[in-house]
Amino acid sequence: MKQDVILEAIDVVKYFGTDAGWMSRGPVIQAVAGVSLEVRRGETFAIVGESGCGKSTLARVLMRLLTPTSGDVLFDGRQVSAIQGAELRTLRRDMQFIFQDPFSSLNPRMTVARLVAEPLEIHAPELSVQERRDRVAQLLRQVGLRAEHADRYPHEFSGGQRQRIGIARALASGPKLIIGDEPVSALDVSVQAQVINLLGDLSRDLGLTLVIIAHDLGVIRHMSDRVAVMYLGRIVEIGATEQVFTDPKHPYTQALLAAIPSMDGPVTDHSATVHGEMPSPSDPPPGCRFHTRCPHAQDLCKTKTPQLAAAQDGSHQVACHFAETLQRPHLPQTAPRKSKTAEARFALYRAATEGGTVTHKTHQDDP
Ligand code: SF4
């Protein structure tokens, strides 16, 4: 494992319906079908794709919330599936998870103080009661909440504020890496931008590594350094976010980009749009899994599976037999880059999605 890599997936496969013994009569769901990737220290890495593409299952395998059918996950050089006992507690401290639905992930009978203090009781038992209280207040401030919020219950908060509580809980153990499974998709769009910026700022200030799972590429461009695009259990394109956005080589990535709201209006280049539903992961098409929806599919695509390979210009990796010869569709290039300040990203994001402008750190405006 390379020094700068904190998390690595090696040919990870996760099938459901294979371990129920002779009683099992249902189809085998091929949720993740051979995924390899590396996440570098301190970066924000995004995994995107439509609902049902296997990205959430992959996230749970990376966290060891699910056991892979085959393949390996390495965290900080350790084989995650082999970790036991006290080492497993250390792994739980170092890797934290942010859930999509902040409400259902918070115990409604616990105050915010208890919710945020709970990980501290497990991972920092040496803290005195006062030290724990101080740490909770510090964590609440870090996520844009106030110390007096500590005595309230989750139902007293808005969706954005509840997600901030979830983030404070995730930060409590002092993790090296946080995986967020659609951390903003349940939120109102203006609140999404606030939480996106909060995560970006925390990652920069604390040197955290973030893995963000999302179905919306527009969200991803605002916060990620690198991105992997998944379709039906496989990665079809992976590389630096700016390269993937400015020169998407896989027809599926092009279709996802064409679907991003743009101030230039809707995309009119139909070679960048796909139709129909994603096939069932219990019966994936042979050859290229995308061939049933791809506007460029040829006979070879129906029989031969394309492998991820470096593009000829060396920019990033793509799994398409014809990636080098396909004509690039015309896609709008209006989305802001991660290198802009958080305030600028926020304003541009909102302008692109709903035509307004707002200022940074407006958590009090949460509905
Ligand atoms: Fe489309 Fe064929 Fe490329 Fe698959 S391999 S994305 S079907 S052109």
Image (spheres, rainbow, N blue to C red):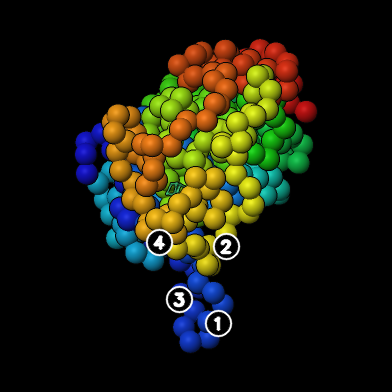
**Of residues 37 and 148, the one drawn nearer to the viewer in this rendering:** 37
Q: Amino acid at mark 2?
A: Ser
Q: Amino acid at mark 4?
A: Thr
Q: CA distance from mark 4 to mark 3?
A: 29 Å
Mark 4 vs mark 3: in front = 4
In x, y percent, where is residue 339? 45, 16
Mark 3 vs mark 1: in front = 1
**Earlier sequence position, callout 2 versus callout 3:** 3
Classify 10 Å Cα crowding around label 3: few (below 14), some (14-19), many (20 and above).
Answer: few
Residue 303: mark in rendering: 4
Mark 2 vs mark 1: in front = 2
Split into 4 quadrants, where in the image is the C terminus? top right
Q: Residue at x 22, y 44 (%)?
A: 1
Residue 19: mark in rendering: 3
Residue 25: mark in rendering: 1
**Earlier sequence position, callout 4 versus callout 3:** 3
Residue at the spot of label 2: 280
